[in-house]
Amino acid sequence: MLRSLALLLLVLGVLELLMITLVPTPGAVAFSHPNLHPLAAIRLYLRLGTIQEQVFQIGGNVALGFILGFLLPQITPHLRGLIRVEAFTALFVAGVEGVQYLFVPGTPLTVDVLILTAVGAALGYVPLGRMFGMRLHPQHLHWWQRRLARSAARRRGTKSA
């Protein structure tokens, strides 16, 4: 039941994200040139953006990452692990950014979105996502945990499961 709730929350979050990102933001037009220099767009928003634009752009990307970092390990045990959560988040956000850049005029393409969502995913995964994911999927062991269990079983002279 908790997995279903996590999946529902993730779907609702993704739908909300698509509704927000696939509509041009008037304030983003000034920042709409492609930017592949890390932290340049963040500095630009902090220097020239209004408080509302800063919260929406910077805080929104961190919040999206937080949601992904928290909910992904609840949905499937295969996305439990910081590297896996970060990789899935990066691929997902790169896809959304690519679609947004190609189909929504006046939207920025910037590497800072990946950085901000990665920070948010780590903040969501480390304290909460990991803990709840382990509670929902206690039987799922990482590769290194399975290896340690086999090695311990060999030392004891028993067969591992």
Image (cartoon, rainbow, N blue to C red):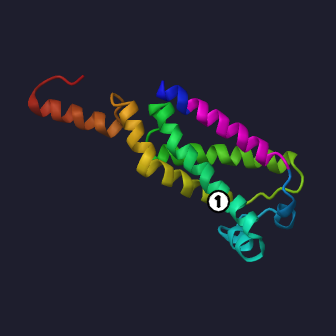
Is 57 above or below relative to 126? below
User: Residue reaching furthest bottom?
Assistant: 47
Main secondary structure of the magenta stretch: helix
The amino acid sitting under disc 1 is Gly
For this view, does 131 lie left or right of residue 156? Answer: right
The image shows residue 2 at horizontal and vertical percentages of: 47, 28
For this view, does 60 lie left or right of residue 28? Answer: left
Residue 19 sits inside the magenta stretch: yes
Is 60 above or below relative to 10? below
Residue 16 sits inside the magenta stretch: yes
Which picture quadrant has residue 120?
bottom right
Residue closest to the eye, 62 or 106:
62
Residue closest to the eye, 14 or 147:
14
User: Residue reaching furthest front?
Assistant: 52
- Give the magenta part as a residue range: 7-23
Residue that carries the numbered disc 1 in the rendered image: 59
Is 121 above or below relative to 39? above
